[in-house]
Each structure stands twice: as structure tokens, then as C-alpha cells.
Image (cartoon, rainbow, N blue to C red):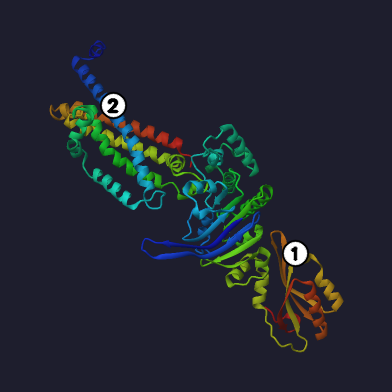
Amino acid sequence: MTDLLISMGLSPAASKITMLLAQGTADTLYMVLLATFISIILGVPLGVILLVTSKGYFWYSPRFYAVLGACVNALRSVPFIILMVAIIPFTKMLVGTSIGTTAAIVPLTVSTVPFLGRLVETSLKTVPYGLIEAAESMGTPPWKIISRVLLPEAMPELVQNFTLTLIVIIGASAMAGTIGGGGLGDIAIRYGYMRFQAGIMLATVVILIIMVQIAQLIGDTIARRVDHR
Amino acid sequence: MIRLHNIHKTYVLDSGRQVQALKGIDLEIRDGEIFGVIGLSGAGKSTLIRIINMLERPTEGSVEVNGTELTSLNDAQLRAERRRIGMIFQQFNLLSSQTVSGNVAFPLLLERHADKSKVRERVLELLKLVGLEDKADVYPSELSGGQKQRVGIARALATDPKILLCDEATSALDPKTTASILRLLTSLRKKLGLTIVIITHQMEVIKECCDRVAVLDGGLISELGSTLEIFSTPKQDLTKRLVSAAVRRDVQDLLEHLKVHEKPEEGDALALELLFLGEKANDPVIVEVAERSRARISILGGAINHIQGQPLGNLVVELAGAPEVIENALKMLQEKVFRVTVLGYAAKGGQNHD
């Protein structure tokens, strides 16, 4: 690859940096997309459980809601950079190592699931209660109220919140780079901060900005498309 | 048949305070009738209608629908029973994420082995029933309020229930749309043999289409009777207030300002309020009585209201003439008119009233 770039007229140094940034971008995308995906898989059920056990909903359980809510809040109050270090044993147990992009996915997900869970809970709460009541009046069982009323009706908000989650994870993934997580954050620290190469630092920032812009654009487009209100 | 017996419902608020929404309701709603429940806000109407399909569980009492005691059913049995009771709402409660046909299909697709093409067929049939066959593939946000309620009705009737509960179904609609929805309900009752329960705070709704009506006041039924009875002879103060707000005001205003006294003086006229009901409201009674008794009858005011299409007429008249002529005319009127109320004597010529 580097040779190809040199043959295209780039200087050896520039080719090397380009390759470095390309690799960093790919690593970041891998971390971010996988962590977002897993967060959605775990965060949506968490949000649903939070909602349906809260006051006024069909599986209302004050004690369960209080305990789960407290756990969620506790996880959310740990700063990401501390959480990342604190759960290293858990990360090792899960993926066998605490270094590298795959390992970074674990703390990224752990910190994001409770965040997304709360967002999902809030989104689902915007669904008018009358719709649940109407579904109940038609003899709809609770899990179908969740799958056919709550989730589809809240879809525009949910998509917005997935986008927000993705963007938060992009930010956090850069932080993961500082303790060997790989990706653009790692490059920014090693080259930009430690070797004073401001150009590379700037390049990573630009790439991150572009990523966030694209994510927001795609998210907005999908949210608009699923919104029929 | 819907039978409510000794229904109590008490809510416990967060503060621990208890609120009694219903305090012992006994009610029997017959098959095929349109039954109205009217009351001011906070009277317990919404709770009452939700007790019929157990969206609200009564604190005490029994709910019998189609011969099944609903309070003793488990959740799954209750869901099966609810499929035989349709319900429509003030805010329509349609899914914004689904098209019109998606909404109507909703209850049909709950069935385990729903056949998609059969569902589609049934949906179109239902949309035709409510006059929206051309709106199958649009989203509810593109519909008017009246159209949304029609979709609500189609959805409520999808599982072919024999009972339809209407919770303030026309309260969010303008008078013209309200009338068209009520006409639709009346025609559906006939076509499908429905029993319809209507909860409303609008006496106009009761007047338009209910066979019988219960007045709910402070969690209890304060008055119950046929709509015509309630409108022609309201007994409780609340009922009188509700009725007078819904009928034409002219007569009420006239009665309030009419100056009469009890003892007749020389040359006084006798003021009467006449109530005509049904077919008789159209008979030329006044002319007949005037001709035969030779009393001079002057009409001070009147109004005709239509209750379920039946005329209910109020007329305020003065009879003048010799005492025996007046007495004779009064007798003749009492024979021919549904109800005659003697208001009193007024100075001749009626110049004494407002």
C-alpha cells in the first residue's frame, strides 16, 4: 500500500503518515460501529425494562425499578477513563486481553449501555399512554405492546438516540486510545502529543469531525424517514 | 348484555389520600341499545367505561359482559374477552407509525396464524363500512379528526365485537363532524346489531342518538331513563341543568322573565307551558282548541327540539277570555297535550312579561 502511494508521487514520509491515518480510521470505525451495535442490542432491552417497570406501566414494580435504576445511575456516574481502567479484569476475562481495539469495545459498551438505556426509556415515555390503552383494549399481550406499539411509535426518537450514542462512542474511543486502545485517539496521543507532530494531531481531529458529521447526517435522514407524525 | 353490580372504585394517590371515583354503580345495558352516560368532568365517567372492559379493575363489585364475569378472569382470558368489546377514544389513539390499513389490521394481526390476504380483505371491508376505502394507504397524520375517528371505529370493529365502548369519542370534533360520527354509529348499530355505550359530557350527543341515558354525579347514578323521559321530565337539578343547556334557550329565558301571580284578577290571562312529544307535536292543537273553546290564545314563545329525531316541543301560551272559557280551554289542552304546566295569571295582554 505504502509503495503504491509512493509510486503515485507521494513522498515516503507522507505515504507513511497517510497509511497510519487510514489504519487509525479503520480501527476507530471498527471499535465504534461494533460498540454501538452491541450497545443498541443491550441498551434497548434495558430501556424497555426500565420503562415497563416504572410507575403507570404494565409491569410496574417499584423495588425492581429502584434497584435497576440505581445500578444504571452508578455506572453512568463513573467517568469513562476510570471505568476503562477499573474493568480491565472483566475485559481480560471476556476477550483475553486488555489492549487493542477489540479490548476497547468492552469498556465502550459497558459505559454506553446504561446511558442508552436511559435515553431509550425517555424516548418510549413520549409514546402517548392512550396508545397503550387502545392496544390493551384490543387484547394485546404486553410483549406485543412493546414490539408493535412502543418501539415503532418511538422509532424517530430512538434513531436520534442511536446517533447520539454513536457520536458519544466516537469521542470515548479516542480516549480509549490513551491506554492502548488503538485507533485515531492512539495516533493523536503517540504522534501529536508525545512527538509534538501537530499536523498529525490536526489530521485526526479533522477525521473525527468528519465522522461525527456523517453520523449525524445519516441519523437525521433515517429519523425523518421513519417519522410519520 | 352488560351488567354492572355494586361497582366501587377507589384510587390511592401518591400522598396516600384515597379518592372514591365510583361509589356503588348498578347498571344494566340491554343488547342492541345505545346507552349514554353523561356527567360533568370528574364524575367518574371515564372510570366507569374502563370498568366495562376492565382497563380499570373495580375495587369492589361485579362486571358481567355477554354472560361472562370479567372480574374473575386471568389476564389471558381477559384479553380474549376484550376482543369481543370494541373501544374508541377521544384522542383516537391511532398508531402514527402505521398506515390506516395497518391500524385497522392491528387487532387482526394479533391472532397467531393470521392470513395476510384475508386480513387485507377484511380491512378493506371495514374501511368501506366507515366510508374510507380510498384512504387505506395514507398515514393518520394526513387525516382530519372525523376521518381519524372513523379509522378508530373500523379498528374497534375489526374483531367483530358485539359491544362498542365510546369514550368521549366526539369531544375533540366540531359539531358537524360529531353529527356525522353519531349517524355512523347509529347506522352501524342497525347493520351489525351492536350494543353501544357512549360516555360524554355533551348533552347534544345523548339527544342525537341514545336510547337511554344515565346521569353520573359524584360517582353515583343520579338519574336514569329513556332519553325522551330525561329531556321531557328531568328530576334532579344536575339533569335539569344539563337538559336546559342542550335544548333551545328561548322558552327557558321566557319563563325566567314572565311575571305571573297565583290569584286571578278581573280580565287576567292564564299562562301555560305546554309540552308536546313525538308525533303529536305536529298536530294543530292550538288552533283546534282556540276554535272550539273560543278562548283567545296568544303564543308567547316556543321551541321544538329533536331527541333522536323525535320532536319535543315547548310552547308558552296565554289563554284570555271569560273564566269558564279559560277553564274549558285548559281542560281541552290537558287532554291533547303531553304535559300542561300552569304557570299563573298574568295581567291581560301579556304586556307584563319582559
Give percent across and percent down for residue B260: 69, 83
Q: Position of residue A28 (x, y in %)?
A: 26, 28
Q: Quadrant of the N terminus of chain B?
A: bottom right
Chain for mark 2? A
Name the mark on residue A18.
Answer: none
Q: Secondary structure at mark 1?
A: helix
Rendered residue at 67%/67% (across/down):
B229
Q: Chain of mark 1?
A: B
Q: CA distance from mark 1 to mark 2?
A: 80 Å
Q: Indicate which disc residue B278 carries.
A: 1
Viewer-nearest residue: B325 or A71? A71
Asked whether the viewer can see residue A183, the reply is: no
- Determine contact: label 1, label 2, CB under 8 Å: no
Residues beneath discs 1 and 2 located on the same chain: no
Whole-percent x and y of residue B72? 49, 54
Q: Residue at x 41, y 50 (%)?
A: A57
Q: Is residue B78 left or right of residue B305?
A: left
Residue B290 location, quadrant:
bottom right
Between marks 1 and 2 in the image, the one whose residue lies nearer the viewer: 1
On the image, which quarter does residue B280 sit in? bottom right
Q: Is residue A4 above or below residue A135?
A: above
**Does any portion of residue B243 appear in the rendered image?**
yes
Q: Residue at x 36, y 50 (%)?
A: A54
Residue that appears at 27% across and 29% down: A31
Mark 2 crowdedness (10 Å alpha carbons): few <14, some 14-19, many ≥20: some
Q: Amino acid at mark 1?
A: Gly
Horizontal relation, residue B13 to residue B9: left or right: left
Q: What residue did someone put label 2 on?
A: A30
